[in-house]
Image (cartoon, rainbow, N blue to C red):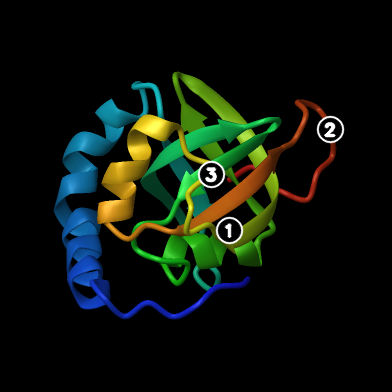
């Protein structure tokens, strides 16, 4: 994981993340997974083993899935995904197993579709996680949650 520390906006983003986790994700999360550009990451807790579902903004970059990290790479779902070397993504009515997570910083946001760059730049969302899809039926490092 690489990058520079950016303190601007972090406390506000952490409060917003807590609000979303407790309230907003439960209401809009199921709807968002059916819309283009959105999905839900299914991941297991590092110590509890409990299954969690986190709505995300997801993009394709060649064969990879890239997810923006507006709350930073220290979010629980990112840490869980790294610890388990993968997760499952529900998007557009499909389930995709993902493996080999790589967290990176892209301040130019080249991995994003151009129309979304101004919005995520304003949110100071420069952190991303990239994951490789595991072919159906293939034994991969990502366990199906």
Residue drawn 55% across and 69% down? 46
Residue drawn 45% across and 72% down? 74
Residues under labels 3 and 2: Cα distance?
31 Å
Q: Mark 1 vs mark 2: which is more N-terminal?
A: 1
For the N terminus, which image quadrant? bottom right
Q: Is residue 49 visible?
A: no
As drawn, the label of residue 110 is 3
In-image side of 134 versus 78 (left or right): right
Q: Mark 3 vs mark 1: which is more N-terminal?
A: 1
Q: Is residue 108 above or below residue 35?
A: below
Between disc 3 and disc 2, the foreground one is 3
Between disc 3 and disc 1, the foreground one is 3
In-image side of 102 versus 122 (left or right): right
Residue 106 picture location, percent across and down: 53, 57
As drawn, the label of residue 138 is 2
Q: Secondary structure at mark 1?
A: helix
Residue 137: which quarter of the image?
A: top right
Residue 28 picture location, percent across and down: 20, 36
Q: Secondary structure at mark 3?
A: loop
As drawn, the label of residue 142 is none
């Amino acid at each position: 994981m690489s990058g520079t520390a950016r303190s601007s906006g972090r406390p506000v983003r952490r409060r917003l993340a807590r609000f979303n986790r407790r309230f907003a994700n439960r209401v809009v999360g199921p709807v968002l997974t059916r819309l283009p550009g959105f999905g839900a990451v299914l991941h297991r807790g590092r110590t509890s083993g409990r299954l969690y579902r986190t709505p995300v903004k997801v993009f394709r970059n060649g064969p990879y899935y890239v997810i923006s990290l507006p709350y930073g790479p220290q979010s629980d779902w990112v840490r869980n995904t790294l610890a388990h070397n993968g997760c499952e993504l529900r998007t557009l009515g499909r389930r995709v197993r993902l493996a080999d997570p790589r967290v990176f910083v892209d301040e130019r946001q080249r991995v994003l579709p151009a129309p979304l760059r101004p919005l995520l730049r304003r949110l100071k969302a420069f952190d991303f996680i990239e994951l490789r899809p595991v072919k159906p039926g293939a034994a991969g490092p990502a366990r199906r949650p």
